[in-house]
Amino acid sequence: MKLAILILTFASVAAAQSKSPVSSALRQMLDGREKNTVAAFEEMPAGKYDYKPTVAQMSFRHLAAHIADGNNYFCANVGDVPQPKVEFNGKESKKQLVAAVKASFAFCHTALEKANDSTLGEDIKWFDGKPRARAWAALGLASSWADHYGMAAMYLRLNGLVPPSAKK
């Protein structure tokens, strides 16, 4: 217990000393989220990319495009840089989608290097066209990574495959 308190104390002091704790946290999360997400899309066989757990849910193919779009949108807004123009038609191959997901994470590395917490209060144009604080994009990015990797992991499990984060 004493060790846990000591670790938490030092962690909170380090976070308090950071001038951009939110942006720094996103940069620290990026490698792990990229590794697991890319590996999930590499793991699923190409013949299963149209798999949907239910009719109402998106296919694995759509999920890959959705993640690439989301990374590009959120990272561009967090880093205050232009968003890459990427179009998907729903017919992309596994190879094309894995490349798109990889490219979106590569873009996030570049964009998040420019992120600074001092800009989180600035307005950006949100999905609905309304202004929102840039902080929405930072929070949206973190929740998107968790939500969508969780979906990909579930799709893998439903097809008898082990998600990357569950492999030892």
Image (cartoon, rainbow, N blue to C red):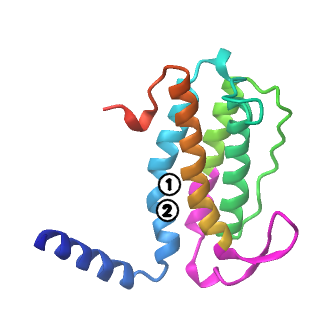
Q: Which residues are magenta?
A: 107-135
**What residue lies at 65% left-to-right and 47% top-to-bottom?**
104
Q: Position of residue 18 (x, y in %)?
A: 41, 80
Position of 137 relative to 166 (above/below): below
Assess disc 2: are there few (<14), some (14-19) or many (≥20) residues with their C-alpha within 10 Å of its C-alpha.
some
Judge left or right: residue 143 versus residue 11.
Answer: right
Q: Considering the numbered disc 2 on the image, is that residue within a helix, a strand or a loop? A: helix
**Can you give x and y, in whole percent of width and height, for residue 142 in the image?**
56, 60
Three-letter amino acid code at the position of disc 1: Leu
Nearer to the camera, 5 or 41: 5
How far apart are the alpha carbons under marks 1 and 2? 5 Å
**Figure quadrant of the C terminus:** top left
Give the residue drawn at x 67%, y 71%. 136
- Count of marks placed on residues: 2
Q: Is residue 115 magenta?
A: yes
Residue 164 belongs to the span the image colors magenta: no
Query: Which numbered marker is on residue 27?
Result: 2
Seen in the image, is 102 located left or right of residue 85?
left
Give the quadrant of residue 8: bottom left
Q: Is the C-beta separation of discs 1 and 2 under 8 Å?
A: yes
- In the picture, the disc for residue 167 is none
Residue 66 appears at what percent x and percent y?
72, 44
Eyeballing the image, is 60 above or below 129? above
Amino acid carrying label 2: it is Arg
| SS assignment at label 1 | helix
User: Quick one: quadrant of the N terminus?
Assistant: bottom left
Which residue is under mark 1? 30
Q: Position of residue 50 (x, y in %)?
A: 72, 23
Q: Determine the residue positioned at 86% across, 33% down.
A: 89
Vertical relation: 160 (above or below) 33: above
